[in-house]
Image (cartoon, rainbow, N blue to C red):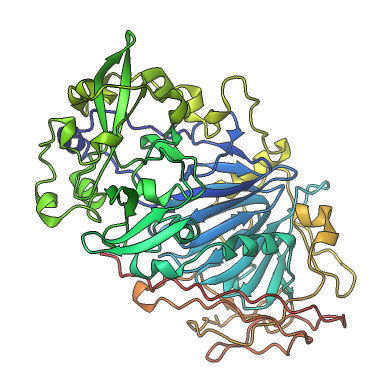
Amino acid sequence: MKRLALALSVGCAASALAGAALADPPGKVGRVAWIEDEVSFLPPGEQSWTWASVNYPVTDGESFWTGDAGRTEIQVGPIEVSADSETELDVLALDYGRTRLGLPQGSLDLKLWRTPRGGVTISTPAGDVVIDQPGEYRIDVGAPQDDGGYTPVEVTVFDGHAGAPGQVGLTDIGPGAAAVIYPGYDPEMQYAQDASIDDWARTREASEDWDVQAAYSPDVTGYGELAAYGDFVQDPNYGSVWYPAGVPYDWAPYRYGRWAYVAPWGYTWVDDQPWGFAPFHYGRWAQIDGRWGWIPGQPVPQPVYAPALVAFIGGLAFGGGGGVGWIPLGPDEVYRPPYQVSDRYLRQVNVTSVSTTTINNITVNNVTNVTQYRNARAAMVVPAGSFAGGAPVQKAAVAVTPAALAQARPGAALAALPPPTPAARAAGGFRGAGAPAGAAPPANLQAIHAAVAAQPAGATRPPAIPGAHTAPPRARPPGAPAFVGPAQIKNPGAQARQPVPTPTHARPGPPAVVPPTEPTMMPGPMVHRPAPTPPSPEAQPTYRPAPPPRPTPPPAYRPPPGRPVEAAPPHPPAATPAPPKKPVPDKRPPEDHPPQ
């Protein structure tokens, strides 16, 4: 179903209050953090696939397809989702209190530095996989079966705990274990096996630094990457300030990038820099001693995303046409959304960077002259057609004299702005007119996609897929890993051949609830648990990466203290021990703040 886009209106307080009866846009979003090769993207409500681009916001209703050789990483606050090739990833629900992804086919490596409120749900053709603890996980879904059978699903836990769907509810999968699920049957347990997408994801994670996040909210998407691209400095006036490194000599905020039209916010800034997400959707910019610095502002439990923290200006005319301009907002300057929102939203989106005094007067629009903005000298102006067409700003910018700029009117630009072109609505609009459309997933995935997206959240049984039937688990050679992801089957030599030893540290977790009935589909000591309730933010467990595995056979499986006996994986076959892996540094974010 197509998403209803909010109409653009003049960015003033009167129009903001007029939208109080409408639903506010989501406060939490993700971003496309990395793309390898080519990845396709389907915006909400659109019928044609286009190409994905880095720093495009990720929200409800979006779909991604990685094709034969593509890979991508999606970041959502402290969650990193890495998709292997031949993977379709659907964003089914994303906001504070709900994180639900759909996986009709392919492989996802998930790293949870911190568990979001409500946990993470991955909907598959076997039912929903529930993750409610920090750790590292992989979910694999096979390609559609030639005989019409339901595709197998595998849930691998490297560190943490996950609930896998089964006949009588969720089966608890502990560290170092994996469950192979044939829909309609209970999971088959085995030792966890590394896949190439896991190594790819860990390499990406090694470039990030979460230590600097100790003084800020981990829900600010993209914040963890900033330390690799600049420096954090304590300023006596602004507190923590981040200075980007390696930018062009004429660089200024909101100059190198383009405007895309993203529902439900409307025009949204997409920056060219690999780090260009958090500093353009949270906080404020200021020139300090001749350098541009980003000021994150005060940390809050649930920071609210903004499409672009600028003041739009209009009334600009040049060359017989009209133009659209904008100015980066500075500290204590109010952001007035150019889309209809409630008064509550207006306060929440400003609270990190605007003083209490200004917040109390936030509904008063007392900026009548462009020169009142402290960053007025960094104003950018482009022709209206270039703005609405998603053209690169640095190429489309026009020179405007200071006298003409002083006559511009804050908030007047969007009133007469032409509707966005298809290029602005597409994530890959920067490829220009005539660029080929993005590749779509195979047609035989359409029915699976629809069934997975339509199943109710928390389902532990497979959804109804037209023409599909359940089939018993397939036999495999003793000791052979049960890889089911299409990329793993296509290139088995690239996958790890040794089982992953069970971590020797077991993080305490809530005890599983064992119902009085015993499983009937499979013998063995399997532990079933009901769907977990959202974890309490006050009792947030601390994530610690696993120590480097020892070059010895895996130890006997022992349940963590305080937990009932769970499904124990079988002993792996004798094999040459794998060489020790490089230890992963401890990059712990702070404990979650309780929601206000």
Furthest residue in direction top, as rendered: 320
Determine the image quadrant of residue 22. top left
Residue 472 location, x and y as percent?
A: 79, 63
**Up-down relation of residue 415 to residue 522 (above or below):** above
Q: From the viewer's side, name the closer residue of 206 and 436.
A: 206
Quadrant, the C terminus: bottom left
Q: Is residue 188 left or right of residue 303?
A: right
Instruction: For residue 374, say whether it is visible.
Output: yes
Residue at point 18% right, 31% down? Answer: 370
> Looking at the image, which residue is at 84% across and 63% down?
474
Q: Nearer the viewer, residue 6 or 109?
A: 109
Q: Is residue 234 above or below residue 335?
A: below
| Position of residue 397 in the picture relative to residue 544 (left or right) | left
Residue 124 shows in the view: no
Q: Is residue 258 left or right of residue 103?
A: left
Q: Nearer the viewer, residue 301 or 220?
A: 220
Residue 469's spot in the image, x, y percent?
Answer: 74, 51
Location of residue 51 in the rendering, given as x and y in whole percent from the top left corner: 60, 35
Q: Position of residue 198 (x, y in %)?
A: 68, 63
What is the total number of numbered labels drawn onto the structure image?
Answer: 0
